[in-house]
Image (cartoon, grey):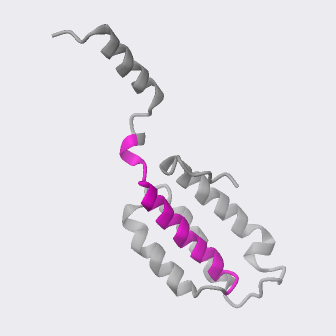
Amino acid sequence: MRLPLRTFAVAAAFAATTSPSSAQDALSEDQCFAVLGAMSKLELSMVGKVPLEDARAELSGLQSMLPESVSPRIDDLVAIAEAARGIAVGDPAHPMATGEFQEASKSYREALAPYCPGFNLDY
């Protein structure tokens, strides 16, 4: 049985606008919000507003759903947050003052962006 020309044209147009792996790899909106919320807690821990252990525990609970390319970036940010312990926020040695945090955060957002396409992570 041959498909009608219109059906074929619609299917071809759809296939051309989607990448083969995007549907399989994309995180749900709830999963994206969970990751972003946990990362916000990690950022807050770096300025002493949330215990680092709480942020780390929340991120640990999300590890199983994270794509392989995102996990190492989050691990980098956790290591930076751990290194920031005991350094005052205004201290020039603090990772937020040196730019180390900003670079790692950008790398994490770039890695996460393809999996959360409805979110603007370019900031």
Q: Magenta residues: mostly which secondary structure?
A: helix
- Residue 80 visible (yes or no): no
Please name the residue shown 46% across and 81% down the image: 57
Q: State left or right for residue 6 relative to residue 35.
A: left
Point out residue 83 in the picture as x, y percentages from the top left corner: 65, 81
Residue at the extreme left of the image, as rendered: 1
Position of the C terminus, as image quadrant, is bottom right
Task: Say whether residue 95 is left or right of residue 80.
Answer: right
Seen at 64% across and 74% down, the residue is 43
Q: How many marks?
A: 0
Image coordinates for residue 67, horizontal then vertical, percent: 43, 56
The residue lying at 51 percent from left, 84 percent from top is 54
Which residue range is magenta in the image? Answer: 23-48
Question: Could one spot residue 20 in this view of the protein?
Answer: yes
Residue 19 in the image: state x and y as whole percent: 44, 34
Q: Report x, y in % for residue 113.
A: 56, 50
Instruction: Identify the image quadrant of residue 99.
Output: bottom right
Residue 50 part of the magenta segment = no
Tell me the quarter of the picture where residue 73 sits.
Answer: bottom right
Front residue of 32 and 63: 32
Decide: is 120 above or below 12: below
Which part of the image, by quadrant, shows the N terminus? top left
Whether 39 is among the magenta residues is yes
Identify which residue is drawn at 77% across, 88% down: 88
Residue 48 or 101: which is nearer the viewer? 48
Say which quarter of the image contains residue 9. top left
